[in-house]
Image (cartoon, grey):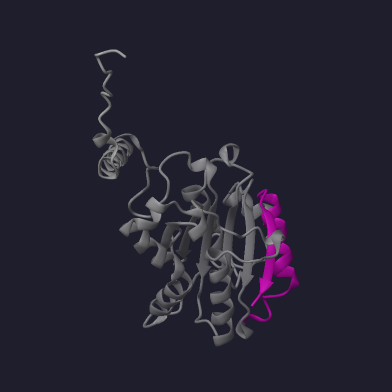
């Protein structure tokens, strides 16, 4: 037997549970710091929480509200249901193509007696809870936008109600001019529109055009002639109409009026997906 005994130089004290916990915590902290340093979250517009980059990858729904008279109680409820359907995921008729996905933008305009309507709402969908990351869920700004998005249908109707209080009845209804403004202001050029995404113009109106351009109360002009006066390219955009019926205008809100608009939208290369009478 050798007089020199080989000793074990391994220091087992370093592997005790306490040290393992310290080393593990330090490693997790290091990973977290590196994540904070190198992770680049998506860039969003602080005003409406819309992505700043690759906007062509997202859809857009523009709502034009043309109200010359207050809504009836039944029309208000029907309109509320339609607005809810814009911002909440649910089983819907796929032909309506209305579901707004995460990142898709929703804007709402109110017509007035000029060619430039008033913008009432502008925001991108924050998506459902399942679609959001943990970082997005923890964001205070995101929480604020979530509430604004969820309460959209109620808030927009309250805003419309405020507009009617003390307001004189409008003497004109420039639907075509507003349509042209919103299309050119909000949507990309026809060749740049992503046809794989939802691009809608949703019109809430009695659909009785009445302006210097054209009045359905006094004239019976062909749609092509009016289009040539105010051309608008609706290629790649779906058109959806909620036609508000009013007994005051029963002699004008007829099948001929609806046919005129169908021909007009077709001439403008838009696809009329919905015409619903309320």
Q: Quadrant of residue 90?
A: bottom right
Residue 14 at x, y percent in the picture:
25, 35
Relative to 158, is 226 on the left or the right? right
Residue 133 at x, y percent in the picture:
44, 51
Relative to 80, is 221 on the left or the right? right
Total marks placed = 0
Q: Quadrant of residue 117?
A: bottom left
Image quadrant where one finds the N terminus: top left
> Is 23 drawn above or below residue 211 in the view shown?
above
In-front residue for pair 141/253: 141
Question: Is residue 268 located in the magenta-colored stretch of the structure?
Answer: yes
At x 28% / y 18%, what residue is drawn? 6
At x 74% / y 69%, what residue is drawn? 256
At x 43% / y 79%, what residue is drawn? 161
Q: Is residue 213 visible?
A: yes
Question: Is residue 118 located in the magenta-colored stretch of the structure?
Answer: no
Image quadrant where one finds the C terminus: bottom right
In this view, which residue lies farthest toward the front? 1
Residue 124 at x, y percent in the picture:
45, 55
> Is 72 drawn above or below residue 275 in the view shown?
below
In-front residue for pair 122/148: 148
The stretch in magenta equals 249-278
Q: Is residue 174 visible?
A: no
> Is 187 drawn above or below residue 38 in the view shown?
below
Residue 67 at x, y percent in the picture:
51, 74
């Amino acid at each position: 037997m050798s007089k020199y005994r080989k000793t074990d130089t391994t220091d087992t004290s370093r592997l005790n549970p306490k040290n393992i916990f310290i080393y593990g915590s330090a490693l997790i902290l290091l990973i977290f710091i590196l994540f904070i340093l190198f992770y680049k979250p998506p860039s969003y517009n602080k005003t409406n929480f819309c992505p700043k980059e690759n906007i062509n990858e997202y859809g857009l729904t523009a709502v034009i509200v043309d109200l010359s008279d207050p809504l009836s109680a039944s029309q208000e409820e029907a309109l509320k249901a339609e607005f809810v359907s814009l911002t909440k995921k649910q089983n819907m008729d796929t032909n309506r193509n209305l579901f707004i996905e995460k990142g898709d933008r929703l804007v709402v305009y109110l017509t007035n007696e000029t060619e430039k309507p008033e913008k009432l709402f502008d925001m991108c969908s924050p998506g459902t809870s399942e679609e959001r990351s943990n970082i997005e869920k923890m964001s205070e700004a995101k929480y604020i936008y979530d509430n604004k998005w969820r309460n959209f249908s109620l808030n927009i109707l309250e805003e419309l109600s405020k507009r009617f209080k003390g307001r004189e009845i409008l003497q004109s209804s420039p639907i075509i001019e507003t349509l042209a403004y919103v299309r050119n202001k909000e949507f990309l050029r026809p060749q740049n529109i992503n046809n794989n995404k939802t691009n809608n113009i949703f019109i809430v109106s009695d659909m009785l055009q009445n302006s210097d351009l054209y009045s359905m109360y006094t004239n019976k002009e062909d749609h092509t002639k009016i289009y040539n006066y105010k051309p608008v390219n609706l290629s790649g955009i779906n058109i959806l109409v909620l036609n508000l019926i009013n007994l005051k205008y029963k002699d004008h809100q007829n099948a001929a009026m609806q046919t005129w608009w169908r021909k007009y939208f077709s001439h403008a290369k838009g696809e009329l997906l919905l015409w619903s009478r309320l």
